[in-house]
Amino acid sequence: MESPQNIKKRLKSVSNIKKITKAMEMVAATKMCRSQEIALASRPYAFAALDFLATVSSLNPTDLPALFKRRDVKTVLFVLVSSDKGLTGAFNSSVFRKFETHQKIEKDEWKKEKHVYIAVGEKAFQYLTKKKFEVARKFTQAGDYTELSQVSPITDFIIKGFLDVI
């Protein structure tokens, strides 16, 4: 049988663990509420995007701007998005696995096309360089809550590259 001092120590450590767990639950709940608010705030954007797509799809194909016209595919851009750090559970490995699966499925098409790679996140950059892919541009430090100022350089780079290829 254990001594009363050891039992008291165990009770105290269990109590401390309970307090720490409670604090962690509160932090997680706060983060979840913030994420839900952001998701709900993005609904008007989603509706506007759907409305925009409906408008574009109703246009005559000859009236479309250069970004929407059909063309032969010669160059393909891959934007690989991951985290900057490895503390994301299986997220990064799932993204990389999906990328490799796409490579295997589209093996014949890959031989016909030129490929350009953009790494969004430090782990994506490390993955692409490890696999010997030439990274055209690297974007990091996006964070949990991305703002327009962080996304604009990525979209500008993609649109400029698309228009230069045309």
Image: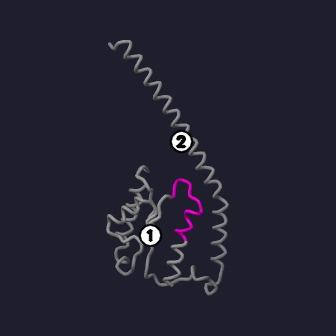
Was residue 102 drawn as part of the magenta stretch in this picture? no
Q: Position of residue 141 (x, y in %)?
A: 49, 58
Q: Tell me the quarter of the picture where residue 123 sits.
A: bottom left
Query: Is 131 drawn above or below residue 165 in the view shown?
Result: above
Looking at the rendered structure, the kind of residue marked 1 is Arg
Cβ–Cβ under 8 Å for marks 1 and 2: no
Q: How many marks?
A: 2
Q: Tell me the quarter of the picture where residue 117 sits.
A: bottom left
Mark drawn on residue 137: 1
Relative placement, left or right, of 164 versus 45 is left
Query: Is 69 drawn above or below residue 153 in the view shown?
Result: below
Looking at the rendered structure, the kind of residue marked 2 is Ala
Was residue 150 drawn as part of the magenta stretch in this picture? yes
Q: Position of residue 113 (x, y in %)?
A: 39, 80
Q: Which residues are magenta?
A: 142-155
* Residue toward you, 86 or 38: 86
Tell me the residue at 47%/64% (across/down).
Answer: 139
Relative placement, left or right, of 88 versus 159 is left
Q: Position of residue 29 (x, y in %)?
A: 57, 41
